[in-house]
Image: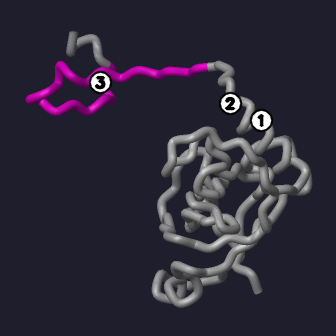
Amino acid sequence: MPDELDPSVQTNEVNAEFKYPFHWDLDFSLNIGEDNRKFFEAIENKRILGKKCPECGATFVPPQEVCVECYVETDEWVEVEQRGVVESYTACFFEFDNLPEPPYITAAIRVADSDICMLHFIDGIEYEDHEELFEKLHKGTEVEPVWANEREGHIKDITHWQPVE
C-alpha cells in the first residue's frame, strides 16, 4: 500500500502505514433546532435574544434549552442589551481557510448579563504589535455588535464586535 500513496505526501517511516491522504467534501443540512432558529431570526432583525431559567433566573446568550446550573428547561425568551464584555481573547497572526485575513481577534464575549459567553470576532482596534493590543483590549473591555448591511439569519449577521467608545 505505501507504494500507492502520492509521492508528494511526506510520511514518518515509523508510522507510514497510519497515514493516508484523502479529500472529503460534504454537502448536508443540519437541523439547528427551534431555539437557534428563533435566535438567528432575531439576529437577522438586529435583535439579540436569550433564554431565562425559571428556577434560578440565569440568562443564556446564545440561548440554551436547559439551564447549565439547575438542569431545568428554560422557557422565557428575553431581548438583551446589545452590549457585551470581553472575558478572554486571542489574536491570531496566521492564515487559515475561511477566516479573516490576519491578524484577527477572536473573543469570548459575555453579552448583556448572560451566564455564558459567545465566541465571535473583535475588530475596530488599531495596533502595531501585541504590546499595543494588550493596552487597548483586555478582560472587561465593553464591546458592541457591528451589524452586516445584508443579513441572512446566521451568526455572521454580526460581522464583529468592537469596543464601545
**Residue in the image at 57% along x and 80% along y:** 140
User: What predominant SS class does the magenta segment belong to?
Assistant: loop
Residue 154 horizontal side relative to residue 61, left or right: right
| Mark toward the start of the polypeptide (1 vs 2) | 2
Between the C-alphas of marks 1 and 2, the distance is: 7 Å
Question: Above or below — where is 112 with respect to 34?
Answer: below
Tell me the colour scheme of the image. Answer: one colour
Q: Mark 2: few, some, or many residues within 10 Å (few <14, many ≥20)?
A: few
Q: Position of residue 47 (x, y in %)?
A: 85, 56
Q: Position of residue 146 (x, y in %)?
A: 80, 65
Q: Which residue is mark 2?
A: 32
Residues at discs 1 and 2 in contact (Cβ within 8 Å): yes
Q: Which residue is mark 3?
A: 7
Magenta range is: 6-26
Residue 57 horizontal side relative to residue 17, left or right: right
Q: Which residue is mark 1?
A: 37
Residue 7, image quadrant: top left
